[in-house]
Amino acid sequence: MNLTLHVWRQPSPRAKGDFRTYEAAGISPTMSFLDMLDLVNERITQEGEEPIAFEHDCREGICGSCGMMINGVAHGPQKLITACQLHMRSFSDGDEIWIEPFRADSFPVMKDLVVDRAALDRVIEAGGYISVRTGSAPDANAVPIPKPHADRAFDAAACIGCGACVAACPNASAMLFTAAKAAHLSYLPQGQTERYERAAGMVTAHDEEGFGNCTNHGACQEACPKGISVEYISRLNRDFLRASLSGIAAAGRGD
Amino acid sequence: MQLDARIPSGPIEKKWENHQFEMKLVNPANKRKYTVIVVGTGLAGGAAAATMGELGYNVHCFTFHDSARRAHSIAAQGGINAAKNYQGDGDSIYRLFYDTVKGGDFRSREANVHRLAELSLNIIDQAVAQGVPFAREYGGLLANRSFGGAQVSRTFYARGQTGQQLLLGCYQALERQVSAGTVKLHTRKEMLDVIVIDGRARGIVTRDLVSGRIEAHLADAVVLGTGGYSNAFFLSTNAKGCNVTATWRAARRGAGFANPCFTQIHPTCIPQSGEYQSKLTLMSESLRNDGRIWVPAKAGDTRPAAAIPDSERDYYLERIYPSFGNLSPRDIASRRAKEMVDAGHGVGELRNGVYLDFRDAIQRLGRDAISERYGNLFQMYEKITGEDPYAVPMRIYPAPHYTMGGLWVDYDLMTTVPGLFAIGEANFSDHGANRLGASALMQGLADGYFIVPLTIGNYLAESPRGGVDAEHPAARDVVREVTARQERLLAVQGNRTVDSFHMELGRLMWDRCGMARNEAGLKEALELIPELRERFWREVRVPGSAADLNQSLEKAGRVADFLEFAEVMCWDALTRDESAGAHYREEHTTEDGEARRNDELFAHAAVWEYRGDGEPPARHREELNFEHVPLSQRSYK
Ligand SMILES: Cc1cc2nc3c(=O)[nH]c(=O)nc-3n(C[C@H](O)[C@H](O)[C@H](O)COP(=O)(O)OP(=O)(O)OC[C@H]3O[C@@H](n4cnc5c(N)ncnc54)[C@H](O)[C@@H]3O)c2cc1C
Ligand code: SF4
Ligand code: FES
């Protein structure tokens, strides 16, 4: 197939960016979207221009690197997959495709489609863990965990930290990410001791990073490649409220 | 090159315990005065950095990724082994030790492997305490499965995302130390060289991938957890960023590189679909627990799978290996698949795969049970191929996957450069000539959580502390060399892309140093690689500048290193004139077509010493003694 790409090119964080048009000719439907970008990049390089910068690594939907907007949708038109899992059979000959970086104030563009998502790491740093010293753990089977709880925790733990939820949200809120990370731990018995400090710490960090408030729009859930449910957000809000009411301070803030 | 493994004395099951007692300790109050650099935030590096931070060392941890969570470990699917014997099926530390030595085809060090089996228990405890959501049974206890040729169920798993869940546990522990101020994380910084001062590793030189700045970082010891080099083959199951730069640059500074030809080909990957494919996708080998592998009995049979009756199918693994069947070890399953395809029995449009069929398992257990076990793998397969594996059998083919070779390390995981340690896939230690499934995660975490944080103290307690900074002449020299190399790459301004060279190297290696090797092919490769390298330095085109984010430049540096390192792989494959595990020399096979070892001449680790550009590397050996697992021909029949 032959396609026309309109790709956001921005040489550096402060430079002004714009869309540039590239012809993607001779694309096979079995190619992945990123294989297609590779091919276009090979041609751009041959012509002496700098190739389109985009992030990727695992190319199988698990590392969370490959975030980009494809025709205005985070990770592209197909549900429940990442951009790297998208295949060209989802497009037709002659299609025009618009490709842009994730847009959010907390995700500054570094170059072309590459954005800085380090704010998500800082939310984890603010309490998104269980404090256990290496070597001090009891036997793994000492505490049985009912399967339904384990499954709920797991559904939340499936988050790959890609940031599509932020890019999709009209407020650029990262509450789906934050809530998923908190819920993974708060559904487990091991995660109870620090549960409310964790909620306080993570939500505070989330706000300090400049992510917007959640207004129950639900676009995040739609965009999430891992099907993370917005229900976790209400759970985190409840935990946060309880932490505030009982005067529990945020954990892990530089102490 | 001195190769003293420094294996502690005493009976094998007491060595680690005794050693822990005998090692010198760094006083807790002094630990923070020691600076340790860890490169890598995968399971090995992440675990090591978190634990050393917790112990009180001043840790600086580097990754070229934008976040510690994105290390390639995240992609591991199938599971992690531990000799917990929760299933009561006769597993034990000794059995895991025994299986690993035998599975490695007697090319690993017994003492290290035994320690690994011992520590496997602690890993699961640690992970569960961190909140890693391993699969559980309805009673709430942990579930296990049998994996990759093991005859006991000792594999712990987390749906098809065991690596992601373990790495998140590790990453969260790391972020906890970042918050506590004991670990400073340097993301988007690629290590490009090691600084050696007075014979000891005292730092690294990195390139900031955003600003392009080349910087020296000094320390009292350096730990490399930088992963494996399967991407020497270009197409592999590894993440695109995986590369050999860190370990190869260390080798150039004096660290011996052990067994570089021991590279594992994984039997269950999705076959290539076209010329422009950028990477191959692994389908977890756990699928072999319920899937049956077959090809049409008649070569060239192009009927769809459903139209081929059972009597005209060849379930060749079940036929050749009645007791292990579809669970035969990776190297064996891979070679048989290649033979079937080479003999014209391949399936799929390009006739480049074999079937992995779930029809019988779905009939026996129901669709729900299969979906509970493998749902996300089936989904992944469907997304890639557009075929529904509940309805038509999967197609699979072997692909480069894991590298057993790596920097040579002694019992303390220290390389031949004092103060330079290597952990995880980056070292050569525990898997011999072939790694068993679900054992890499185990090894990375054992090295990172439980071994190097202790053994590093044994080194630091007796070494100089501080006293060097970025102005040290040795550090400035390395910075200068690294900078010059970047400039050289940009200056070529030829007409070929970096990827085109990488692909050419990959094909060359796959054909001559891949699943099957022979003397003529390897000698040819040793002629072709230097030629290709020369063309690379004459014809490559790296657009952009060194002073900002430049992905072409990053790739160019990595490919340039692969072009040097590939030669050492071929030297190793050529001079190991035997077959062992995944190293299959066509000249050395049994009547059944299995690897035929030569224990008299090759029961050793081959360790390569870099001797300068254009010089062939020197081969040294560490003799391996098998006192507990008697040397025997593997037989999985
Ligand atoms: C698809 C797939 C599935 C797998 N499934 C399993 C499984 O089920 N069970 C199992 O036991 N094993 C499995 N493995 C193997 C296992 O995942 C790896 O061997 C293991 O995770 C390697 O961990 P590591 O910490 O050594 O390295 P990695 O996870 O590769 O981490 C390397 C780190 O080093 C950093 N790095 C590298 N070079 C540099 C540099 N020059 N400068 C700065 N940073 C650098 C990277 O950024 C990264 O953080 C699988 C492998 C693959 C490819
Ligand atoms: S919640 Fe979903 S969209 Fe958001 S970071 Fe996690 S996986 Fe990505
Ligand atoms: S490249 Fe890893 S999720 Fe897409």
Image: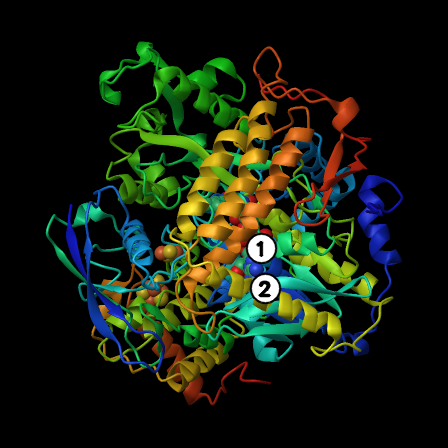
Residue B626: assigned label: none
Query: Which residue in the structure is indicated by mark 2?
Result: B191
Q: Please state the chain letter of the residue tagged with numbered disc 2 in the rendered image.
A: B
Quarter where residue B226 is shown? bottom right
The residue closer to the viewer here, B180 or A234, is B180
**Closer to the camera in the image, B305 or B274:** B274
Residue at 39% across, 80% down: A206
Residue B599 in the figure: left or right of residue A234: right
Lateral position of residue B565 relative to residue A195, left or right? right
Residue at image point 25% right, 69% down: A8
Is residue A166 found left or right of A253 in the rendered image? left
At label 1, which amino acid type do we have?
Thr
Q: Nearer the viewer, residue B317 or A112?
A: A112
- Badge 2 crowding class, 10 Å Cα cut-off, few under 14, some 14 to 19, many 20 or more, is many
**Local secondary structure at mark 2:** strand
Question: Is there CB contact under 8 Å for labels 1 and 2?
Answer: yes
Q: Residue A67: x percent and y percent?
A: 32, 63
- The answer as to whether callout 1 falls within 8 Å of ligand 1 is yes
Disc with the residue nearer the chain's start (1 vs 2): 2
Query: Label 1, on which residue?
Result: B245
**How far from the left and from the top, in percent, is residue B223?**
68, 61
Q: Is residue A232 above or below residue B375?
A: below
Q: CB at mark 2 closer than 8 A to ligand 1?
A: yes
Label 1 chain ID: B
In which quarter of the view is residue B300 placed?
top left
Say which amino acid is labelled 2: Met
Residue B330 visible? The answer is no
Mark 1 packing: few (<14 Cα in 10 Å), some, or many (20+)?
A: many
Residue B605 in which image quadrant: top right
> Could one spot residue B113 in this view of the protein?
yes
Give the answer, above or below, for where B172 lies relative to B309. below
- Residue B245 position, x and y percent, is 58, 55
